[in-house]
Amino acid sequence: MHRVLGQRHGRILAGDLTEGSATFSVTAVLPVVESFDLAADLRKQTSGLASPQLVFSHWEVRSS
C-alpha cells in the first residue's frame, strides 16, 4: 500500500492498528488527479485486502 501511494505522490500522515481487530488504518493525502483508479490499483496490489475511502480534505499549492 505504501508503494502505491508513493507512486501517486501521496503522503502518509498516520497509520494505526485498530485495537481488538486485524484492521490497519492509514491516513494519507494525495492529489485528486492521482486518486482516479486508486481503488482498483490498491485492490490489485493487496490481493483485494485493501478498501480505500476517499474524502476531500483541503487544497494546497505545492512548490516544485
Image (cartoon, rainbow, N blue to C red):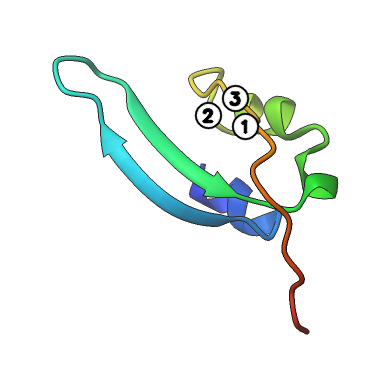
Q: Is residue 1 left or right of residue 21?
A: right
Residue toward you, 35 or 2: 35
Picture layout, residue 62 above or below residue 49: below
Q: Residue at horizontal 68%, vertical 50%?
A: 58
Determine whether label 2 and label 3 are within 8 Å by CB: no
Please state the horizontal and vertical placement of residue 4, each as a whole percent of the image.
62, 47
The amino acid type found where label 3 is placed reads Gln
Q: Residue at horizontal 42%, vertical 39%?
A: 26
Q: Residue at horizontal 24%, vertical 25%?
A: 18
- Between circles 2 and 3, the one closer to the viewer is 3
Find disc 1 in the rendering and name its residue: 42
Report, in whole angstroms, how far the alpha carbon at label 1 lies from the one at label 2: 6 Å
Q: Is residue 34 left or right of residue 27?
A: right
Q: Residue furthest left?
A: 20
- The local crowd at label 1, few if under 14, some if 14 to 19, many if 20 or more residues have their Cα within 10 Å, is many
User: Regarding mark 1 in the picture, which secondary structure is present there?
Assistant: helix
Find disc 3 in the rendering and name its residue: 53
